[in-house]
Amino acid sequence: MDIKQYVSDKAKKAKAASRALANISTEIKNNALFKMAAGLEKESSRLISENQKDLLEAGGKGLSRAMIDRLTLSADRVKAMADGLREVAALPDPVGEVLKMWRRPNGMEVGRMRVPIGLIGIIYESRPNVTADTAALCLKSGNGVILRGGSEAVHSNKAIVELLSKAGAEAGIPEGAVSFIENPDRACVMEMLKLNQFIDLIIPRGGEGLIRMVSENSTIPVIKHDKGICHVYVDGKADLAMAEEICFNAKVQRPGTCNAMETMLVNQEVAKTFLPAIVGRMKKAGVEIRGCSKTRAIVPDITAAADKDWDTEYNDLVLNVRTVASMEEAMEHIAAHGSQHSEAIVTNDYQNAHRFQREVDASAVFVNASTRLNDGFEFGLGAEIGISTTRIHARGPMGLEELTSTKFIVFGNGQIRK
Amino acid sequence: MDIKQYVSDKAKKAKAASRALANISTEIKNNALFKMAAGLEKESSRLISENQKDLLEAGGKGLSRAMIDRLTLSADRVKAMADGLREVAALPDPVGEVLKMWRRPNGMEVGRMRVPIGLIGIIYESRPNVTADTAALCLKSGNGVILRGGSEAVHSNKAIVELLSKAGAEAGIPEGAVSFIENPDRACVMEMLKLNQFIDLIIPRGGEGLIRMVSENSTIPVIKHDKGICHVYVDGKADLAMAEEICFNAKVQRPGTCNAMETMLVNQEVAKTFLPAIVGRMKKAGVEIRGCSKTRAIVPDITAAADKDWDTEYNDLVLNVRTVASMEEAMEHIAAHGSQHSEAIVTNDYQNAHRFQREVDASAVFVNASTRLNDGFEFGLGAEIGISTTRIHARGPMGLEELTSTKFIVFGNGQIRK
């Protein structure tokens, strides 16, 4: 098979479909999403049997238990996928929204209208539900999508895309608008990343290696969903009961996520009172604590943090703790070691809350709330395609609006350039 | 000189400065812009004598007359640069604007605040005024900037940046916030394009070759300012007097710009009346006309358009003319040959105006106005760093707001993830 031709043909077709899709009514798009949901539910057992093939092959590949769990489809999970499609159908269509319109001195009216980005390439790993989720979000926002899932989920993904395409076609969605690169050859990804003439945006979702590979090789704009080294700073003026709940939640509620806390910064004014309680509770929950020398002077029964620990995303039940002399020291630590993802302060001091919120550089900055809330659903965006760590276009959770661009619309009555 | 080290040191310093700059008050930034403007005017004669060195060397390089004109600094041009800085000072500061804020069911408030992008790399050619303009726009929007001008303007650019930096330092702008790569080695550009850890966005301004080189080699997000193949469609229901003014303006007022018309599409209903008048007027203004066979049947005394002409950006007094049977045919032509830059319809028909505006894909779509109006000043953005042809982040004219990103700001009272 000629990989170059194969990928290019898929992308060309998807681009043509995306052009037609840009002007399709919300009614048709929603109808397609409902048909897709019904199709997934109806063919649930077939999806599960295709998924079994992936699981069988995964056994031989030595995937971790966590990866196998993420790969597995059950009747409940298929149902959840279908429900996800219906939820996207229920969200407002961002396309066509005029954000603002104003009149110029020469009488012409200028506005900005939300339009689809075009054709979006999604490169992702493992979880087959990502296939349905991202296809739905792209469809609703009027974008064509070309999906490239991990080779370990190829049977599941292929079956899902076939169902979505069939249901979409019945509803009047142009053929190829949801496209899938099933050839497992890695060269396909490299080809995708160079197809500027067809693909308008690449969104990689997955581990650090995947993100780096895509960023380094793509000639197409990339919006990364990269790692999170997130901090909670417990201020000298914090409500310590609140601080304990927030820190515990930020670390323990789901430690494998990018918005979980990796390092807790505690002001020395409250360290003696606060540390024994929170460290005890964390340890009871199975968290390994690594502390600075000041912290270990207060809670001795923990590991000493090594220099590299402050720059590590554990994605696990491990927590760094540093006792700081001031909020300035905490902010300097965050600037030096954070990944500009999710940062929080717990304080009742107005000035500190205001300054931290203003000066800390991250996709989301929290006052008195858990970093775990940096999420499209929690923020009310309705759904999310991921959390962007790219500094342009969209930072933080990306919902439907973030999958659109704008065009200037101008209404004149004969205006010319003077 | 170790190029890698040289560029990386510059960028590292500029990045550190950009972090400090992000939180500097509008007052300090405006004060710096005024001091910079005064500095340019005071040192006008020194700038002109540095510029003479560039012009002298340009003589030996065989630059075109147009390029030499663009390169030349005069007292008037230095004054215009200084005025430009004062105009940027007068614009509202976009940093800190909260675009929207809403309350979630759990009581936490979520908002989006405009923040600087970070460090912006500008790679450009020829005109020394771009140095002052872009530095001012980046400074006002709180971004550090690392400038890489063309080697033909290196003496002028270096002198301008030195003046700006000196005036900036006096006003309290962090050192390195306006940085300049003066080493003419092209390897410097290649190094810049790989410095993801320091540079957040690359904006190339220049010819097709430069834009392509940057897009293909940058691992940093790029916002392109690419070519424009723009159309005016004269509908069967157009006011023909208005159509003539708009088409003439779109072609002749400044043919070298990206928003000038390259192809005029005329509905056959009005072609017999409209074409002789407009073609006569264009020819009188020195425009060479290349037409399709239908057009040549009406105005025989023109060249036959070749296939490649429809895909050519002339940037000159040359115009393609095609007579079409319907608006659909015009829109298909635009989709096939346009560069999604600036597209216009002239019509008095409500449905055609509405449909063209909605369905045509371009950074700006005009009803009854000239494509030449696709411009930051004309749209009321106050100033522009260029016209983006990238589909994400900012499409069309980019002003100060488009040089910012957003962060989510969250105010809670103990919210955690359930």
Image (cartoon, coloured by chain):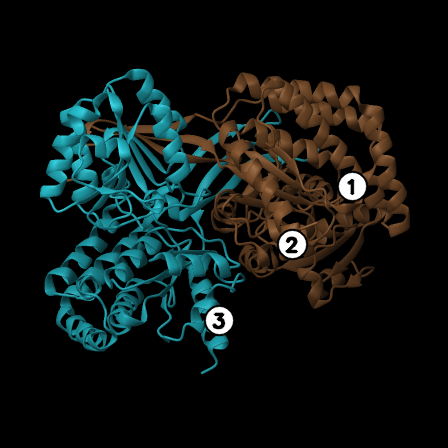
Chain colours: A cyan, B brown
The residue lying toward the viewer, choosing from B380 and A26, is: B380
Q: How many neighbours does mark 1 have within 10 angstroms: few (below 14), some (14-19), or many (20 or more)?
A: many
Residue with the mark numbered 1: B153
In this rendering, the label closer to the viewer, 1 or 3: 1
Task: Tell me the mark number nearer the camera, choosing from 2 and 3.
Answer: 3
Q: Quadrant of residue B177?
A: top right
* Residue type (three-letter) at the residue carrying disc 1: Ala
Q: Quadrant of the rendered structure where residue B82 is?
A: top right
Q: Which residue is mark 3?
A: A8
Residue type beneath disc 2:
Leu
Structural crowding at the residue carrying mark 2, measured as other residues with C-alpha within 10 Å and reported as few (<14), some (14–19) or many (≥20): many
Residue at x-position 58% and y-position 29%: B139
What's the distance in space between the residues labelled 1 and 3, CA to CA?
Answer: 41 Å
The reply to whether callout 1 and callout 3 are in contact (CB within 8 Å) is no
Q: Earlier in the sequence, mark 1 or mark 2?
A: 1
Residue position for label 2: B265
> Where residue A135 sits in the image (x, y, percent)?
31, 59
- Separation of residues labelled 2 and 3 (CA atoms): 31 Å
Q: Nearer the viewer, residue A241 or B305?
A: A241
Q: Callout 3 environment at 10 Å: few (<14), some (14 to 19), or many (20+)?
A: some
